[in-house]
């Protein structure tokens, strides 16, 4: 007889839940890389080296010289919601680190083979640990899951292999490793421009040519030059927006191309809010429409804008990827930036005009 019962509701296995959640945070290899990059910056690193194989699908390796991880923390490192950065909910409003959720490494361990080699300042040797599904596992050919002492420099190296090996539908969706590699170079480029005092390199595995290489001492304009080319770098003008306490704006600065420059390639604007690389559609729209009155039709500008706003006016907890942020007084703040950009572009424009007329 036909059963009148509906389908039975069962609890999902915890590892299935975690794998699904991980796939939401990490859609592309570049998402994993961004998280690791931010961890390295959070750790106070001054040098960060990235090696990528097959667009990051085969291998993503990031090596830093930051403060490292204590051996005793390695057992819980990749569990979900373990972090050294946040303890109370209230701390979210005074956050100075990129991380806070303790989800990134956990997520990666659910969808890749993850190996961490780290040496903290106090440690006499480095420790290597291998993870799967949030937990320590024995390395290939090894018998113990315990972290193993090895030689190594101060800092941390994270190795992510075979990303999405257990998410076949995702793997099939990738069109080309070179698209994925370009996404990675894009993310690294953005952080390399913004993060003064840190040297970055990024290259493909087995190649000697670096896609990105910046010195720790390089200025922002130098960074833009090596990453986006000297054509752009030689046409940059600086903008500075004064703090406006009443709208929670601590200030903004940036480098944008002048009105006589028309980029051949359309580089998506580099926007940072409180040092986080974000996309801000309203700001992009406002600046693009402003430029359209200076540039020939369909022309492109290069824009790097770094905004600092009061931490409690910013909500970075909108989405797990943290790419989307909300902030108070968005319209007023965008208005201030546009006013400054219009003033600066106008001034450069009229001085050129004046020169050519003489
Ligand atoms: P979150 O950054 O939100 O804390 P993650 O999963 O990204 O969460 O990292 C978990 C913890 O691992 C961090 O809080 C930090 O203590 C440690 N960690 C991760 N990467 C590094 C690194 N490169 N150097 C030092 N510590 C790290
Ligand atoms: Mg993190």
Image (cartoon, rainbow, N blue to C red):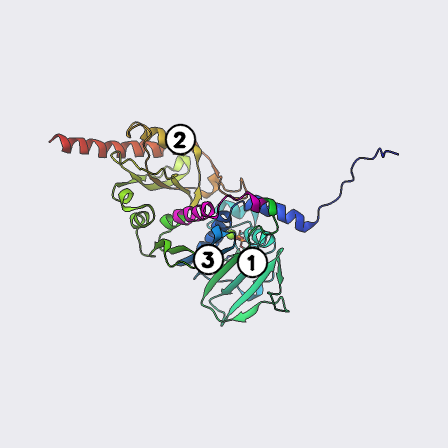
| Res 339 visible | yes
Q: Earlier in the sequence, mark 2 or mark 3?
A: 3
Q: Nearer the viewer, residue 123 or 332?
A: 123
Q: Mark 2: which secondary structure? A: helix
- Residue 43: mark: 3
On screen, residue 190 versus residue 125, left or right, reads: left
Within-10-Å neighbours for mark 2: few <14, some 14–19, many 20+: few
Within-10-Å neighbours for mark 1: few <14, some 14–19, many 20+: many
On screen, residue 24 versus residue 7, left or right, reads: left
Q: Which residues are magenta?
A: 170-190
**Residue 58 appears at what percent x and percent y?**
52, 54
- Residue 106: mark: none
Q: Main secondary structure of the magenta part?
A: helix
Mark in the foreground, 1 or 2: 1
Mark in the foreground, 3 or 1: 1
On screen, residue 272 versus residue 167, left or right, reads: left
**Residue 337 appears at what percent x and percent y?**
35, 35
Q: Nearer the viewer, residue 1 or 255?
A: 1
On screen, residue 111 versus residue 4, left or right, reads: left
Q: Quadrant of the C terminus?
A: top left
Q: Quadrant of the N terminus?
A: top right
**Residue 67 appears at what percent x and percent y?**
46, 62
Q: Mark 1: which secondary structure? A: strand
The verdict on label 3 being within 8 Å of ligand 1 is yes
- Residue 114: mark: 1
Query: Which residue carries the number 2 mark?
Result: 285
The verdict on label 1 being within 8 Å of ligand 1 is no
């Amino acid at each position: 007889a036909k059963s009148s019962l509906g389908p039975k509701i069962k609890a999902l296995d915890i590892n299935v839940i975690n794998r699904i959640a991980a796939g939401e945070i990490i859609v592309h290899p570049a998402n994993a890389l961004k998280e690791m990059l931010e961890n390295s910056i959070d750790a106070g690193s001054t040098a960060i080296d990235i090696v990528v194989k097959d667009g990051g699908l085969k291998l993503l390796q990031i090596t830093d010289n930051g403060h490292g991880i204590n051996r005793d923390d390695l057992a819980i490192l990749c569990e979900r919601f373990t972090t050294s950065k946040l303890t109370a909910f209230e701390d979210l409003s005074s956050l100075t680190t990129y991380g806070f959720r303790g989800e990134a490494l956990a997520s990666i361990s659910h969808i890749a083979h993850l190996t961490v080699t780290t040496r903290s300042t106090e440690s006499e040797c480095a420790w290597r640990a291998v993870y799967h599904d949030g937990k320590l596992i024995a390395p290939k050919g090894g018998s113990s899951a315990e972290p193993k002492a090895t030689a190594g420099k101060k800092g941390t190296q994270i190795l992510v292999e075979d990303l999405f090996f257990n998410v076949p539908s995702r793997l099939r969706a990738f069109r080309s490793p070179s698209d994925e590699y370009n996404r990675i170079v894009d993310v690294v480029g953005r952080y390399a421009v913004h993060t003064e005092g840190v040297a970055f390199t990024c290259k493909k595995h087995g190649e000697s040519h670096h896609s990105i290489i910046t010195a720790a001492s390089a200025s922002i304009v130098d960074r833009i030059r090596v990453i986006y080319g000297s054509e752009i770098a030689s046409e940059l003008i600086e903008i500075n927006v004064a703090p406006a306490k009443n709208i929670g704006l601590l200030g903004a600065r940036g480098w944008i191309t002048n009105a006589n420059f028309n980029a051949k390639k359309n580089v998506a604007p580099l926007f940072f809010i409180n040092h986080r690389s974000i996309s801000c559609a309203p700001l992009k729209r406002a600046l693009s429409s402003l430029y359209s009155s200076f540039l020939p039709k369909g022309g492109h500008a290069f824009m790097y804008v770094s905004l600092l706003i009061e931490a409690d006016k910013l909500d970075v907890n909108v989405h797990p990827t943290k790419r989307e942020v909300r902030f108070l007084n968005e319209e007023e703040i965008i208005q201030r930036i546009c006013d400054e950009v219009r003033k600066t572009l106008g001034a450069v424009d009229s001085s050129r005009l004046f020169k050519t007329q003489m």
